Image (cartoon, grey):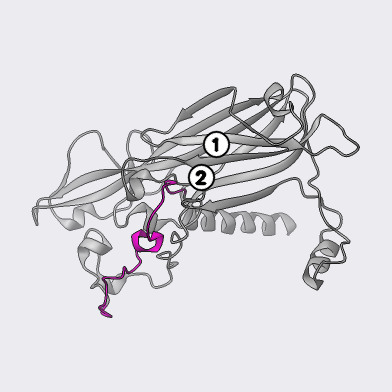
Amino acid sequence: MIADSLAARDTILQALREELVGPDPNVPPYRGRPLDTNGPIEFAIWQDARGPWHDAATGEEILHDIEPVRRYGVAVLHPAREEADPLATAVGLATADDTSDESTPLTPEILGAGADPLEVDDDDFDLSLANAYEPSAMAVSFRVRLPTGSRLVAEGTMGRYEPLQVHIAETDSIRSWWVRRPVQLRAVFETADLASGRSRKRVHPAELSCAAGPLDLDIEAFSRPAGSGGDPDVRLVTVFLVNRTTSGRGSVSCLFQAGFMVSATDGAAILPYPEGRGSASQSDEDESIALLYRRYQTFSCFGVMPRGRAR
């Protein structure tokens, strides 16, 4: 019974992840029919173009009815450039020039190939405001013991989307679809760089492998002493990933399904993160959570930064 319940929970979590974050590269194959994206894409009528589809060569998903930044609202990193009015450029948001209260009609061009406005699923999550915050960086902080010769390895499998031009002969129209491309990242940080010095320092990876296409991704670390009793091998490390892409706009310049894992290797060990349990300033809720999870320890702290603040 417990095994059945856990399996059901895993199924729900996987479906929720695919809905909000996007396809999981560890759970193939993607849904829909295969489509050859290596040449011109043309359909005779709208009905023939109805999805879902996936790339015949790679198995990656193809979005045919909505732009990626409107489809997914979690784990998206926007370019870290300044904007005079960040909300004005967020997809799905009204600008200062939009004064009409009338809603945009649901046309086949908006809904997708051959879609019927009456068939739209009203139970779908409304993600139109999910990317208004436009985070451009993510980071994880942890306490780690770094003996001589040890290393930290950050790895991530993420995604980006390229536009596809699709011709519908029936209406002689061109529509933009989006095909997912994988992004692979691996960075190695050496102890000699992380553990030297008595103050906070910014560390570049000693080894970096990044297959991100036109995206400009930057992964670095902040390291500072955090040893109890003056242990020089213990550091408080923050590894951060920033999307520094300057070319393109919208989905083509964003990183999707963003995330990475940091592993301690060659003798390094991640230690419990400092916590303020028992502090007099704790609220009732904090004390309740501390009691509930009293047998568990925190080993990292994760966060994202809004667009324009990533440096």
Numbered circle sitting on residue 127? none
Q: Amino acid at mark 2?
A: Ala
Whether residue 31 is situated above or below residue 47 in the rendered picture: above
Which of marks 2 and 1 precedes in the sequence? 1
Q: Quadrant of residue 95?
A: bottom left
Q: Label 1, on which residue? A: 156
Q: Residue at x 42, y 33 (%)?
A: 212
Q: Residue at x 28, y 80 (%)?
A: 101
Q: Nearer the viewer, residue 208 or 223?
A: 223
Q: Label 2, on which residue? A: 258
In the rendered structure, are the residues bearing label 1 and label 2 in contact, judged by CB atoms less than 8 Å apart? Answer: yes
* Left or right of residue 65: residue 269: right
Q: Quadrant of residue 285?
A: bottom right
Q: Quadrant of residue 266?
A: top right
Q: CA distance from mark 1 to mark 2?
A: 8 Å
Q: Amino acid at mark 1?
A: Gly
What is the x, y in percent for residue 72? 43, 56
Q: Residue at x 44, y 59 (%)?
A: 131
Is label 1 in a helix, a strand or a loop? strand
Q: Which residues are magenta?
A: 77-102
Q: Nearer the viewer, residue 177 or 45?
A: 177
Secondary structure, magenta segment, majority class: loop
